[in-house]
Image (cartoon, helix red, strand yellow):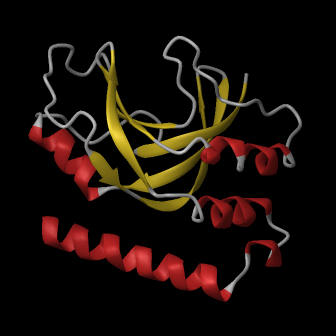
């Protein structure tokens, strides 16, 4: 099962690379396509960090700095996602505080790769979140190693690039 996920993971990387080469980001007038194309130009990895029981991948802030202005073209009410309580900007949530408060994760500062699979908008508690959706067999394996289920909040692994309150 893990081998199949790994093969699909690398197949997606190859497919997305070919698509980027064949189609320039500016060849489409669709803003979502432009955002995805730009996102795939940014490094697709991060380093696992922890803050008060919240585990996340620290990723390149270009996910917000470069993609948010494109997203804002869709709706002027969209705001940058900034999380001052954690001093975070671009990140991928991996383990939430309420999932297992006493967990001791060995992989802090370890590099994890991911693949961008799409863009999605989700509404929760009257806030609309615009996010880049990701897949990462390694992050799924990490959660499984510590007895956690698949992520249920929002849409699996993701990077929030804008929100409307």
**Quarter of the figure with the C terminus:** top right
Please identify the quarter of the rendering in which residue 68 is found.
top right
Answer left or right for 140 relative to 34. Answer: left
Identify the residue shown where x is 67% and y is 62%: 38
Q: Residue at x 15, y 14 (%)?
A: 102
Residue at image coords 71%, 66%: 33
On-image quarter of the N terminus: bottom left
Out of 54 and 61, give the one closest to the viewer. Answer: 61
Q: Count how many numbered circles sit on residues in the image.
A: 0
Across and down, in percent, residue 98 comes to: 29, 16
Vertical relation: 122 (above or below) 86: below
On the rendered structure, is 4 left or right of 58? left
Q: Name the spot of residue 106 as percent of width and height, x first.
A: 13, 33
Along the horizontal axis of the image, is 28 left or right of 154? right
On the question of residue 2 being in view, the answer is yes
Is 25 drawn above or below residue 50 in the view shown?
below
Percent position (x, y) of residue 147?
11, 34
Residue 91 in the image, given as x and y percentages of width and height: 48, 36
Q: Is residue 19 left or right of residue 156?
A: right
Residue, far front: 109
**Residue that extends furthest to the bottom in the rendered view of this protein:** 22
133 versus 145 height, above or below:
below
Give the vertical position of 85 relative to 146 (above or below).
above
Q: Residue at x 63, y 47 (%)?
A: 62
Res. 95 visible in picture: no
């Amino acid at each position: 099962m893990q081998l199949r996920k790994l093969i699909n993971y690398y197949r997606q990387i190859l497919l997305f690379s070919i698509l980027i080469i064949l189609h320039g980001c500016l060849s489409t007038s669709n803003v979502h396509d432009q955002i995805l194309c730009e996102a795939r130009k940014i490094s697709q990895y991060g380093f696992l960090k922890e803050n008060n029981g919240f585990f996340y991948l620290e990723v390149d802030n270009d996910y917000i700095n470069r993609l948010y202005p494109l997203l804002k073209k869709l709706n002027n009410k969209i705001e940058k996602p900034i999380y001052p309580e954690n001093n975070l900007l671009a990140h991928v949530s991996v383990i939430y505080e309420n999932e297992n408060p006493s967990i001791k994760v060995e992989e802090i500062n370890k590099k994890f790769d991911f693949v961008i699979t799409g863009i999605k908008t989700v509404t929760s508690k009257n806030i609309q979140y615009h996010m880049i959706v990701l897949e990462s067999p390694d992050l799924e394996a990490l959660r499984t190693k510590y007895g956690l289920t698949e992520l249920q909040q929002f849409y699996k692994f993701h990077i929030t690039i804008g929100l409307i309150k």
